[in-house]
């Protein structure tokens, strides 16, 4: 059998063809702005991640229809982590190393952010607009590549505790129902801090109950609360909407005079859907204004999480529009640090700077009413 060597000119053609393909692929990629998201698209908390993704994508799609950022379209790659920390590590590495994203956006949850934010920061990639108010993303001084859109859980809890005290409820009659992980631990710490601001320092007297993450195992917590003396008049809840809904359905009947307070992470729209038939005594802090005060015309815009994703994406687009050079993570970091104080339509005044990586300090307290809607009780700007 004869070995026939291809002619030199043929090899040269193959070589140059390969180089041309690589150049074209590189140019095509340079025409897009690559963003990445690791969030819960499956599992018990999938609706949280889906709403955040859909809200951000709606804003990016609008930007692309207007021509993008000086002709460059925004491409958002989303990967499912199921709200599990082990999955988010793999996803974050894939987004950074394979997708070459300039920013990771819209992470849903504290335990996942605890993995992805430090990793992105260490790799020099912007981590922006996570759906969590946890302190771990709000360090002093700020992590250089970590930026937040929303008010913190600490600010939300101050609004909750203030309302409880204003109702004449003693701190000794406050109980907690917490997710048994870093989110729940954050909830406990910020509740203690908020109570200490009111002059209460007997935190060892607080009744604290838990449920395991990604489960509906609430029975132990209910049994503990039933045995409590005195009976709790306010229960502060920090967790995800499905176990919270299950908990409130039981506890609402057992404690007919107790008020139930939730942080925004529970997802107002999701929780209200799960609590049909239950009225009154259910409160939740929000970090975006209720839809009744807004004019954004998009499907899903009444969903608070969708709205948070949409507003957060608007701020990111504003920063991208201020970059004149090649859009890199470092350029985006500089642009976010340079935004200063500005007004966001349908939201209010925001501010970002090198010494302040949280855009909003606004918190709205809402009440679940007989029409199955969350009505504003009041809004607050709480100091950081």
Image (cartoon, helix red, strand yellow):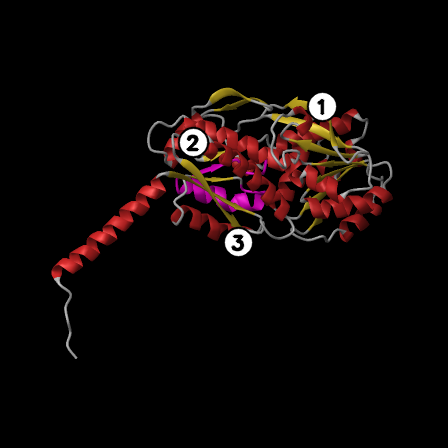
Which circle marks residue 378 in the picture? 1
Q: Quadrant of the N terminus?
A: bottom left
Locate residue 381 relative to residue 118 in the image: left or right. Answer: right
Q: Nearer the viewer, residue 183 or 68?
A: 68
Q: CA distance from mark 1 to mark 2?
A: 39 Å
Locate residue 140 relative to residue 157 in the image: left or right. Answer: left
Indicate which label's residue lies in the foreground, 2 or 3. Answer: 2
Q: CA distance from mark 2 to mark 3?
A: 38 Å
Q: Position of residue 287 (x, y in %)?
A: 63, 30
Vertical placement of residue 188 versus 318, above or below: below
For the magenta stretch, what is the residue range?
Answer: 107-133
State the residue position of label 2: 67
Q: Quadrant of the C terminus?
A: top right
Q: Position of residue 15 (x, y in %)?
A: 20, 55
Q: Are marks 2 and 3 in contact (CB under 8 Å)?
A: no
Residue depicted at x 63% and y 29%: 288
SS of the residue under disc 1: strand
Vertical placement of residue 278 versus 160, above or below: below
Q: Farthest residue toward the bottom?
A: 1
Locate residue 131 relative to residue 378 in the image: left or right. Answer: left
Residue depicted at x 16% and y 56%: 12
- Mark before the other along the chain sequence, 3 or 1: 3
Q: Position of residue 76 (x, y in %)?
A: 47, 42
Label 3 crowd bin: few (<14), some (14–19), many (20+), radius 10 Å: few
Q: CA distance from mark 3 to mark 1?
A: 39 Å
Q: Farthest residue toward the left?
A: 8
Asked if one can make out residue 243 in the rendered structure from this viewpoint, the answer is yes
Which circle marks residue 86 in the picture? 3
SS of the residue under disc 3: helix
């Amino acid at each position: 059998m004869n070995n026939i060597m291809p002619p030199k000119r043929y090899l040269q053609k193959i070589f140059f063809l390969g180089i041309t393909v690589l150049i074209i692929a590189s140019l095509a990629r340079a025409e897009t702005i690559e963003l990445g998201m690791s969030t819960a698209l499956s599992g018990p908390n999938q609706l949280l991640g889906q709403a955040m993704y859909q809200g951000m994508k709606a804003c990016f799609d609008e930007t692309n229809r207007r021509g993008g950022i000086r002709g460059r379209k925004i491409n958002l790659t989303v990967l499912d982590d199921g709200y599990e920390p082990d999955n988010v590590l793999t996803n974050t590495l894939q987004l950074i190393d394979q997708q070459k994203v300039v920013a990771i956006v819209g992470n849903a949850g504290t335990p996942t952010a605890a993995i992805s934010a430090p990793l992105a920061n260490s790799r020099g990639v912007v981590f922006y607009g996570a759906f969590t108010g946890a302190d771990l993303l709000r360090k002093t001084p700020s992590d250089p590549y970590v930026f937040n859109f929303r008010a913190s859980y600490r600010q939300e809890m101050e609004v909750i505790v203030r309302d409880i005290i204003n109702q004449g409820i003693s701190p000794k009659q406050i109980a907690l129902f917490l997710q048994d992980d870093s989110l729940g631990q954050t909830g406990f710490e910020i509740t203690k801090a908020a109570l200490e601001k009111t002059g209460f320092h007997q935190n060892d007297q607080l009744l604290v109950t838990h449920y395991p993450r990604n489960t509906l195992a609430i029975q132990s917590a209910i049994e503990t609360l039933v045995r409590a003396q005195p009976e709790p008049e306010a229960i502060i809840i920090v967790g995800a909407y499905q176990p919270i809904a299950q908990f409130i359905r039981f506890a609402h009947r057992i404690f007919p005079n107790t008020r139930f307070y939730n942080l925004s992470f529970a997802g107002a729209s999701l929780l209200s859907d799960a609590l049909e038939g239950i009225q009154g005594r259910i409160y939740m802090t929000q970090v975006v204004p209720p839809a009744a005060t807004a004019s954004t015309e998009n499907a899903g815009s009444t969903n608070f999480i969708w709205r948070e994703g949409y507003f957060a994406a608007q701020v990111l687009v504003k920063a991208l529009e201020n970059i004149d050079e090649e859009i890199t993570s470092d350029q985006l970091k500089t642009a976010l640090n340079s935004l200063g104080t500005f007004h966001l339509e349908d939201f209010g005044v925001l501010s970002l700077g090198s010494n302040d990586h949280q855009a909003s300090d606004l918190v709205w307290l809402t009440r679940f009413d007989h029409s199955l809607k969350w009505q504003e009780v009041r809004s607050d700007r709480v100091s950081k």
